[in-house]
Amino acid sequence: MQDIQEIFNKIEKSKKEMKELKSAYKEALDGVQEYQLLQEQLKALREKRKHVEQTIREQFSTEMIKIDDLKIDIESDMEMLSYIAIAKITKGESIGITDKYSNEYEPIFKVKFKKVA
């Protein structure tokens, strides 16, 4: 089994190589006149779309507030679901969740590393 530090170093090296390749690709795209023209057209269309969306959003202000409230509720419920699942697993209990279509769900745990400041 490989050392965790070796794997981390390999990931960092791969990320650096990917960043360099993406940078070279972006430079090549920026050198093409047609690409620059398309980028400008795309920017104009995005602005137009944003304006239309904002107009509709203003008409649906109460619905948009409700959507924001529901997002917050869902986030807090998902967090609570995670805490309960972790608590049950640490106690050795099994976890099973089923939706209205009888689809079963099982927990997935993920380890993520964060840079220490």
Image (cartoon, rainbow, N blue to C red):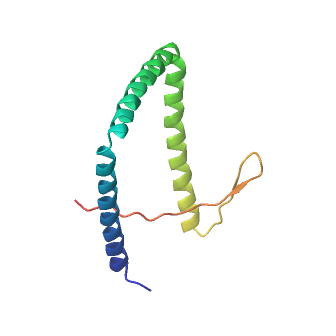
Q: Residue at x 30, y 64 (%)?
A: 16
Against 66, residue 111 (above or below) is below
Residue at the spot x=34%, y=79% of the render?
6
Identify whether 66 is placed above or below 39.
above
Comparing 9 with 13, the one in front is 13
Residue 72 position in % (x across, y down): 49, 36
Query: Considering the image in quadrants, where does the C terminus appear?
Result: bottom left
Q: At 54% from the left edge and 47% from the top edge, which residue is drawn?
A: 78
**Residue 89, image x, y percentages:** 57, 66
Vertical side of 28 occupied by 3: above or below: below
Image-quadrant location for residue 9 = bottom left
Residue 114 in picture, x, y percent from top left: 33, 61
- Identified at 37% across, 38% down, the residue is 34
Q: Is residue 60 left or right of residue 93?
A: left
Marker count (numbered):
0
**Quadrant where the N terminus lies?**
bottom left
Instruction: In this rendered view, identify the residue nearer to me: 17 or 107.
Output: 17
Identify the residue at the far top of this view: 59
Q: Position of residue 41 (x, y in %)?
A: 39, 29
Q: In the orientation shown, which residue stands out farthest toward the left?
A: 117
> In this view, which residue lies farthest toward the bottom?
1
Judge from the rendering whether residue 70 lies leftward or rightward of residue 24; answer left or right. right
Q: In the orientation shown, which residue stands out farthest toward the front?
A: 33
Q: Is residue 34 left or right of residue 103?
A: left
Instruction: Indicate whether 54 appears above or below 23.
Output: above
